[in-house]
């Protein structure tokens, strides 16, 4: 991937697209102070350089019937490369696993699972997770309430997205 030196306009583009990936190129160009063609060229360059990895639609889990969100700590019997790879490959193939992190501390992995109900979770744990070779310990914590959920990354101050027509605050 080509390496880019991002300027304030690139950061603004990234910030705005994080908030609304369906924003038209004309709206985006207006918001960052460019004409549409150069704006589109910058977006394409950001995509090619890997700053923008994909565009997604975020669904409301409750509205689509996924009522149970669980954080599961998994400890492996041995932390050798082959065991880690085997576990990670198995987890990647499970659609109910929303996130998976290799951790420091007491557990080797922290995964977030979203399912319709406790029975589906039980099946995931008993028929999948406990049957994975090398899994030593599983500890689950249920999320009672989602206090904050954010997909937009905290970008540098230069990237703070402003609504079109808003004046920038400049420190002197």
Image (tube, rainbow, N blue to C red):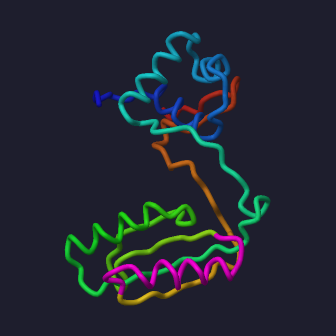
- Residue 121 highlighted magenta (yes or no): yes
Can you tell which quarter of the image residue 142 is in? bottom right
**Residue in front for this viewpoint, 82 or 56:** 82
Relative image position of residue 50 (x, y in whole percent): 38, 35
- Callout count: 0
**Residue in front for this viewpoint, 145 or 54:** 54
Q: Main secondary structure of the magenta part?
A: helix
Residue 46 lies, with reference to residue 157, above or below; the image says above
Q: Which residues are magenta?
A: 115-135
Residue 47 lies, with reference to residue 29, above or below; the image says below
**Residue in front for this viewpoint, 162 or 79:** 79
Can you tell which quarter of the image residue 64 is in? bottom right
Residue at image point 68% right, 82% down:
118
Residue 54 lies, with reference to residue 119, above or below; the image says above
Relative image position of residue 103 (x, y in whole percent): 35, 73
Residue at image point 57% right, 71% down:
113
Relative image position of residue 23 (x, y in whole percent): 66, 28
Please state if 94 lies on the left or on the right of 87 as rendered.
Answer: right
**Residue in front for this viewpoint, 167 or 95:** 95
Residue at image point 46% right, 36% down:
52
Quadrant in the picture for the N terminus: top left
- Residue 160 highlighted magenta (yes or no): no
Residue at image point 62% right, 20% down:
25
């Amino acid at each position: 991937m080509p390496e880019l030196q991002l300027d304030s306009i690139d950061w603004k583009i990234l910030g705005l697209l994080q908030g609304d990936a369906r924003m038209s190129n004309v709206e985006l160009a207006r918001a960052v102070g460019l004409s549409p063609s150069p704006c589109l060229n910058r977006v394409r360059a950001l995509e090619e350089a890997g700053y923008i990895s994909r565009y997604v639609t975020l669904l409301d889990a409750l509205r689509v019937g996924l009522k149970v969100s669980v954080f599961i700590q998994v400890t492996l019997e041995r932390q050798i490369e082959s065991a880690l790879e085997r576990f990670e490959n198995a987890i990647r193939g499970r659609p109910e696993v929303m996130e998976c992190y290799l951790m420091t501390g007491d557990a080797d992995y922290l995964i977030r699972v979203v399912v319709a109900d406790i029975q589906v979770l039980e099946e995931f744990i008993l028929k999948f997770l406990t049957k994975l070779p090398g899994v030593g310990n599983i500890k689950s914590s249920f999320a009672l309430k989602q206090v904050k959920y954010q997909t937009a990354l905290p970008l540098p101050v230069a990237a703070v997205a402003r609504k079109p027509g808003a004046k920038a605050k400049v420190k002197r």
